Structures are given as structure tokens and as C-alpha cells.
Amino acid sequence: MRRPGTKRHIKPILVYIAALSLFFPAFASSRWVEMVGHGCRVMVSDNWSVDRHEADKDIIYEFASPDGRSIARLRSFPVSESVDLATLVATFEYHFLRSCQRKSLADHEINGTKGKLAKYEGDYNGEQIAARVFYVLRGGRAYILWSKVPLELGDYDQLEANKIIESFTLEQKTISSSGVVVTSLLTGEGAVGEAGVRDVKYSFSHEVSSILASFSWTGDASGGGFTVKWSGPAGGKVEKQEKLKVARGPEGGRIRVEFPAPSEGFKPGNYKVEVWQKDMRLKAVNFSIE
């Protein structure tokens, strides 16, 4: 039996819940999608679809938003030694973005991988779009990560399609003079285990109280230990530097470090965390504060 007065409260409660949904949309968790055998991966929201195509030696991963209007593609194929980035850019533009206007082309680095980042606007199959393309050449292969969204969506930096590009990670083994290799570097919120991070992400709210990083390595790092550098948006200035000593042992290990927010909070922008041994950078990851 309904208690007296219950019915009249149902509608206001439903209206309140609906209003909250406008301001706090459902959070979509993400997962890594790896291009197996080619050492690269991107982070994609769980509600985006993933499709893989392969033709001869050309491999393409396509990611699509739930409404199908925003698309990101990761493509890799072998190239000859004579191909440079200028040739790669010109060829891709001719075949895929002929009706778009290039707005900018600049050197860009994502998680330690250097390449060229281009921004475009224009017509694509009858639709006005904004597009970004990250061009990379590495070890006799080209990697092209590009995304397109309807031009009307506005602030590209905050869109999932751009976050996929900025999560691009190409494995690269930089070996220190003592034979140490940093095999992984993750950022996130919340600690798990002795040295891991629970919620792996590369984009954070400016209200976050601290950011965690966890890295693993192989080899004996006891001789030189590690230096972890956190750089901020003010011209890449190092905001925190921490030297870590490592116990003797050739089996490698894992360490978690923390970047607490300053008293005034994190400033929005692009940040970077790097792991160094002596004068050699072994691993770097970019992340953003929104």
C-alpha cells in the first residue's frame, strides 16, 4: 500500500534526476586497443566500436562513436627508406583530404613518439568536418593516426576523437648504459597493489588532488636509480623532479610516484611525466588537465 503523500513527490524527483543527467552525463570507461605485432596502441572509450581491416601489408583500425559521426583511424604500412614525412603528408592529403584545407602542420610529440600533427577543415564526402592527423615514420613503417568530426561540434581538444590521437603509444626500447629498459609508464588516479594505479587515464579534471604514475623496468637499476620529471603547461617547465633509489637486483621492478596538486590547483593544459636514468630519458607519457 502506498503511503499517503508519496505520489506527489515522484514527479519532482524524476525531474531532478533528469536535470542532473544534463550536467553529469554517464561516464564511459576506456580500454587499450593494440595493433598486435606492431607495438602501438590507443585508448578508446568502451562505447566506441572497433573494426579491423587488413589489405596486403596495410593494417587499419577504425573507431566510431555511438552515433557514427565521429571517426578515428589508426593505420600502419611499410615504406621505403626514401619516404620522408613531407612525402607521407602530401600523399595522404592527396588521397584522403583533397577537399579539405590544411590549417596547420607542426612538429608534435605524443608519449615519446615524434612526428607531424596537421589540422584540417573542409568537405569530406559531402560533410563539413574538422580533422587531425598525426604522421609518424619509424623502423621502415608509416603510422598514420587520424580523426574526423562534424565541424559543428566545436572544441576539438575536448572531443573523444582527439583524445584517441593523444593516447597514441608506440613502444620504443631506449636502453640505458647499464642495460635498463623502462617497459611501461601509466598515469591515473587511485593506487592499487604496492606500485600500480587503479584508474588509468591521460586526461584529468583540474580539481584532481593528485596524479599518480607507475612505471616498470627490466635490468639492474641499482647503480643509477631513476629521476622522474613532471613538466607543466608553462613552456614545458619542470614542476617537480624526484630522484628514486632502487635496491640491487637484476630482475627489474615497478615503482609508483605522485604529483600532488599545487595549493592553487592544477592549471589546465598539456603535461608530461618522464623517467630518466642519468642523462638518458627512458620513457615519457603526455597527459592533460581540463
Image: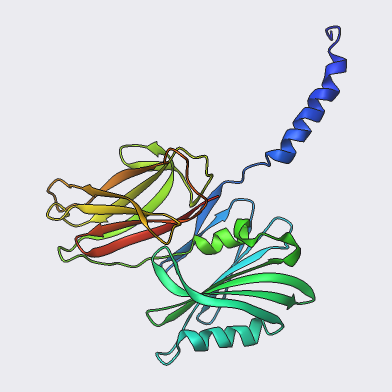
Q: Which residue lies at the image location 19% right of the left edge and 60% below the top edge? A: 278
Q: Is residue 2 left or right of residue 289?
A: right
Quarter of the image holding residue 258?
top left
Residue 257 is at least partly visible in this image: yes
Numbered marks: total: 0
Residue 275 image position (x, y, % from top left): 29, 56
Q: Is residue 80 above or below residue 270?
A: below
Q: Is residue 34 visible?
A: no
Q: Residue at x 63, y 79 (%)?
A: 102
Query: Which residue sits furthest bottom?
Result: 82
Q: Which of the 4 image quarters holds residue 23?
A: top right
Coloring basis for residues = rainbow
Where residue 97 appears, x then y in whole percent? 66, 81
Residue that appears at 14% across and 45% down: 247
Q: Position of residue 252 (x, y in %)?
A: 21, 52
Q: Residue at x 67, y 39 (%)?
A: 24
Would you say 144 lies left or right of 188 here?
right
Q: Is residue 205 above or below residue 150?
A: above
